[in-house]
Amino acid sequence: MGTVNIKILDSTLREGEQTPGVYFDSHIKLAIAEKLNEIGIDIIETGHPAVSEEIYSTVKMLAGQGYNSIIGAHARSIKKDIELALECGVGFLGIFYCVSDERLSSVFKTDLSSAISQITSSIEFAKNKNPDLLVRYTPEDTVRSNYENVITAASAAVKAGADIISVADTTGYMVPGTSRSMYDYISKLRDDFASQNLEPQIAVHCHNDRGLALANALDAYRAGVNIIDASVLGLGERAGIVDLAQLLAVLSVDYDQNHWHLDKLPEIYQLVSNYSQIPIPVNYPVSGKNAFTHCAGVHTHAASVNPMHYESLSPHLFGRERHFALDHMSGLASLRFALQQIGMDNIEKELEIEILNHIKIIGQRGRIVDISELPHIVETSKHYKRGSK
Ligand code: HCA
Ligand code: CU
């Protein structure tokens, strides 16, 4: 099935900043939020105002930008955190608190019923101060916590005014098609709310410890979840969370959800990669340098006839171009495509072969020829040919 109008929550500025070594200065956060707003992201989670004064003022600044995206903050289930978030003028507040008996007794020295009264009074406090505020409650490590505790705490949260309940796979534990299926989890949770006449929006937050974050998010989508969390480059604690571009690609191309300006993705990936100092892996789907580059001669030949022979996603959808790599694998098809790109397509075959030899030699040394080198290689090959005769 899938939700008619799926919403995306981007957490690059909150979860993404929990990547070891990553911190975005306030003006970088502004630049990132601007791009997320342009892409058409529904909710931008911008940080936890209680962490520092700088984060507090940044969240406040972002909340005042008048974006279409709703600006959100993160808070523990504590009045002080919630007050600070409300002062920032956010439209969305994510409150989290664990519900596992073991965590509650060993870390918080409390029990479920006290935790629930703290959660409900926090939600009531926030809603009283701002009835328009969208409030999300997340039972941290939802999927590994005792289900009875989750449904009890989450139902109490909804009755206290929470609009959204998030299912957090905090440790990337779920595996599609097994007894730990996100599809089954979300379906059961929704049915158990419905049987009490409760109908909160359901969100999903999938960590990528097993490399299954996107698969689990899509499983949740199939089960009718309303909001999916993601971040640019999948940044986040440990192996991170769902990669935003990959998620939007599949939702747009394969599930006909066309709400986003996907052509803005390369700009935000470059921005986040530069300022997090985390390189985009070359073979990263959608955003990697090689994501739309064909290499082997057989591929480039077939792809130059019709790109769809070796592509199931069009680069143009994502503001990208198709490339044919020029290296030791290249054949005449790649070369001719590249020559066409630089407007040098009237070259006699003998010279083309000479140019290709040049390219192959460079490729065998373990380097790809950049298109900007090509005019110089053409010129050199002419002289090389003359010189060798
Ligand atoms: C955290 C953990 C969290 C919370 C998600 C949420 C998780 O860093 O606080 O509040 O919805 O993965 O459980 O990111
Ligand atoms: Cu998380």
Image (tube, helix red, strand yellow):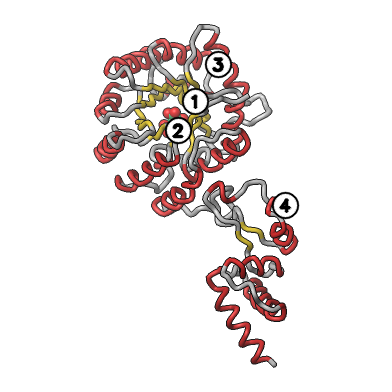
* Quadrant in which the N terminus appears: top right
Please give the residue where the numbered disc 2 appears in the rendered image.
Answer: 9
The kind of secondary structure element at disc 2 is strand
User: From mark 4 to mark 3, how far is it between C-alphas?
Assistant: 42 Å
Labelled pair 2, 1 in contact (Cβ < 8 Å): yes
Mark 4 or 1, closer to the camera: 4
Mark 2 is surrounded, within 10 Å at the Cα level, by few (under 14), some (14 to 19) or many (20 or more) other residues, namely many
* Residue at disc 1, CB closer than 8 Å to ligand 1: yes
**Residue 36 drawn at (x, y percent):** 41, 41
Mark 4 or 3, closer to the camera: 4
What amino acid type is highlighted by mark number 3?
Arg
What amino acid type is highlighted by mark number 1?
Ala
User: From mark 2 to mark 1, how far is it between C-alphas?
Assistant: 9 Å
Q: Earlier in the sequence, mark 1 or mark 3?
A: 3
Mark 3 is surrounded, within 10 Å at the Cα level, by few (under 14), some (14 to 19) or many (20 or more) other residues, namely many
> 252 or 146, which lies in front?
252
Mark 2 or 4, closer to the camera: 4
The kind of secondary structure element at disc 1 is strand
> 319 or 91, which lies in front?
319
